[in-house]
């Protein structure tokens, strides 16, 4: 094990000496032992959640504690640095993630208490009474739009909340929203994951965007089928295969075209809108022979939570429908506007103070083989309250609340009640982001990545899984690309593979890790108010996550070695 004494001391003229700690990726000189040790914090948290049924905030706390001990005692990270890394992650958990969760639940509460949510449910049921088709429309199409516009947990919060309101059981609403929120993740938040990958690690933006656009459309077609199979079973899925095919194709084709010929920013927005409109128009001329009315998962009729009674379809006036939909239309507009780079830049110019974390900022250094030359890790927390997506959601909730006839005092009281309701979820998100950030600065996540990188000819498969584990640990495809994008480039060069192929694989594989990352699971349980059932959600989605990630890995492997798939690779 490498002791603290190996940290380097740098001297500058007329300045106090400062200590820069270099990351260690194999502290025991044995990658098997080091990899097993690096996995302990994640295993602790997942086992506590999924098998020991420990409450999420306690499980996250235990995971963070184990990560602190391993970072300090095994990896030789100075204790003060480790603590500050966890603190930085905690701040990130509050803003932007927790801020999104709090405000989307606030809007949902206002709509429910006002009764307008019931009107919205009836209008959605008016499009189709079939639960399978409602799931396609809301979880896949509507969720993909919010992923493209905002990302960072917004689509799961919105769609899970709507599904629970429509009568879906808590496990169905949570788990299926997570499964649906996969195919659009790589281009989420107006292409942020891809743009960040290219900017940080020197990829050609259009080339890597095009490569992702030659991987994900296949899964954009597959995921809607997978979603309905997971919900209702194979036979029920085949009963509505024409609608599923329309949904998947009308998303996959624009996803390919926009990513290959326009760029990453509007891929999800355009694909989601085309898919949504195509499905609605198709349902005007086609309906299934039998209407699926069950709101529980096939084989999970007793899922630990009660399904809501089926929504009774009522006829509402045009004015009532407009009032019910207006808050959600305002939400859509605000989220889209807040996602525009020009708007973000303007709001940040008004107020976005940056706080370098003293004692951590530029004090941790990444080294080979992760980077070609030692690179310092920045540790700056930006309090971008104005440009945060959650602020746009809050504004939409306040405007929507006024439309729903709430007075300012009632809005303040409702916000306070919402904060109290989600307090443990916010604590959980803070602890989980603290864990994910600490693994990044301590280098334990890189140890896991290097274990995948040493797989030789099988690297296209395991390199894809590297992206999956990156998102599962950090909760963000963007963060996973920052974390492992450089390593993918180095490994691809050494193995004679296309760097664009493996850079894209990191992002494409990562999308399947989105459904099991702890922060998304907490968002889902909070949106459905199925508190303290995060372990049930994790156990349900884990198989779907690893199975789909392996399929992406196999697809990337064929693109690396098997004709005609090799002809798809952007060199």
Image (cartoon, grey):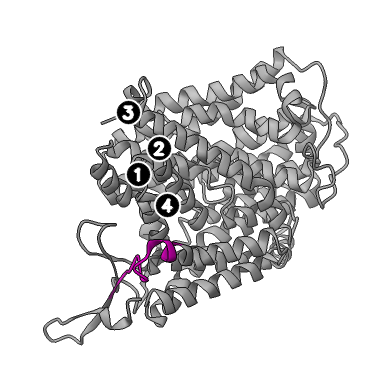
Quadrant hosting residue 74: bottom left
The residues bearing labels 2 and 3 have C-alpha atoms spaced at a distance of: 21 Å
Instruction: State left or right for residue 408 relative to residue 560.
Output: right
Name the residue located 81 percent from the left edge and 41 percent from the top edge.
167
The residues bearing labels 3 and 4 have C-alpha atoms spaced at a distance of: 22 Å
Q: Which residue is mark 3?
A: 569
- Compare marks 1 and 2 and give the one earlier in the sequence: 1
- Compare marks 2 and 3 and give the one earlier in the sequence: 2
Q: Residues within 10 Å of mark 2 (few under 14, many from 20)?
A: many
Q: Which residue is mark 4?
A: 480
As for residue 26 lying within the magenta part, the answer is yes
Q: Residues within 10 Å of mark 4 (few under 14, many from 20)?
A: many
Instruction: State left or right for residue 459 relative to residue 230.
Output: left
Residue 341, given in percent of the width and then of the height, sits at 38, 46
Judged by depth in the image, the label closer to the viewer, 2 or 3, is 3
Secondary-structure class at tag 2: loop
Disc 1 and disc 2 in contact, CB within 8 angstroms: yes
Q: Quadrant of the N terminus?
A: bottom left
Mark drawn on residue 265: 2
Residue 529, given in percent of the width and then of the height, sits at 74, 55
Q: Residues within 10 Å of mark 3 (few under 14, many from 20)?
A: many
Judged by depth in the image, the label closer to the viewer, 1 or 2, is 1
Secondary-structure class at tag 4: helix
Instruction: State left or right for residue 187 relative to residue 498.
Output: right
Judged by depth in the image, the label closer to the viewer, 4 or 2, is 4
As for residue 540 lying within the magenta part, the answer is no
């Amino acid at each position: 094990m490498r002791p603290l004494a190996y940290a380097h001391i740098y001297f500058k003229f007329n300045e106090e000496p400062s200590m820069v700690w270099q990351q260690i990726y194999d502290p025991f000189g044995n990658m098997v032992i080091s990899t097993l040790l690096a996995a302990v914090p994640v295993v602790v948290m997942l086992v506590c959640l999924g098998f020991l049924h420990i409450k999420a905030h306690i499980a996250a706390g235990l995971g963070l504690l184990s990560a602190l001990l391993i970072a300090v005692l095994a990896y030789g990270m100075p204790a003060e640095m480790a603590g500050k890394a966890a603190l930085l992650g905690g701040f990130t958990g509050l803003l932007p993630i927790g801020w999104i969760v709090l405000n989307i639940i606030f809007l949902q509460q206002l709509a429910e208490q006002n009764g307008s949510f019931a009107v919205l449910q009836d209008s959605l049921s008016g499009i189709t009474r079939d639960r399978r088709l409602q799931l396609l429309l809301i979880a896949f199409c509507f969720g993909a739009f919010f992923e493209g516009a905002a990302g960072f947990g917004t689509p799961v919060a919105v769609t899970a909340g709507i599904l629970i309101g429509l009568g879906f059981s808590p496990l169905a609403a949570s788990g299926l929203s997570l499964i649906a929120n996969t195919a659009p993740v790589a281009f989420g938040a107006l292409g942020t994951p891809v743009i960040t990958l290219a900017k940080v690690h020197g990829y050609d933006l259009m080339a890597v965007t095009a490569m992702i656009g030659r991987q994900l459309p296949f899964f954009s077609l597959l995921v809607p089928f997978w979603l309905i199979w997971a919900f209702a079973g194979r036979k029920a899925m085949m009963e509505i295969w024409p609608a599923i095919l329309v949904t998947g194709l009308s998303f996959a084709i624009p996803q390919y075209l926009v990513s290959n010929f326009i760029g990453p920013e509007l891929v999800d927005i355009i694909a989601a809108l085309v898919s949504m409109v195509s499905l609605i128009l198709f349902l005007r001329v086609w309906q299934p022979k039998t209407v699926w009315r069950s709101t529980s998962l096939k084989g999970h009729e007793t899922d630990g939570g009660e399904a809501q009674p089926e929504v009774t379809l009522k006829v509402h006036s045009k004015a009532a429908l407009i009032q019910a939909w207006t808050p959600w239309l305002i939400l859509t507009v605000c989220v889209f506007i807040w996602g525009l780079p020009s708007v973000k830049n303007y709001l940040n110019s008004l107020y976005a103070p940056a706080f370098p974390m003293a004692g951590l900022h530029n004090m941790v250094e990444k080294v080979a083989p992760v980077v070609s030359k030692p690179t310092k890790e920045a540790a700056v927390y930006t309090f971008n309250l104005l440009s945060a997506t959650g602020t746009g959601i809050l504004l939409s909730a306040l405007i929507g609340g006024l439309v729903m006839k709430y007075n300012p005092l009632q809005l303040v009281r409702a916000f306070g009640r919402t904060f109290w309701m989600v307090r443990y979820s916010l604590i959980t998100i803070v602890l989980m982001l603290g864990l994910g950030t600490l693994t990044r600065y301590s280098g334990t996540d890189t140890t896991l990545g290097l274990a995948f990188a040493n797989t030789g000819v099988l690297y296209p498969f395991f390199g894809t899984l590297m992206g999956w584990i990156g998102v599962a640990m950090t909760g963000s495809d963007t963060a996973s690309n920052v974390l492992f994008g450089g390593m993918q480039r180095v490994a691809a060069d050494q193995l004679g593979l296309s760097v664009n192929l493996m850079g894209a694989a990191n992002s494409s594989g990562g999308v399947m890790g989105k459904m099991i990352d702890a922060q998304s699971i907490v968002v889902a349980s909070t949106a459905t108010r199925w508190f303290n059932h995060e372990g049930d959600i994790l156990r349900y989605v884990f198989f779907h996550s690893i199975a789909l990630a392996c399929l992406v890995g196999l697809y990337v492997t064929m693109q690396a070695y098997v004709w005609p798939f090799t002809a798809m690779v952007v060199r």
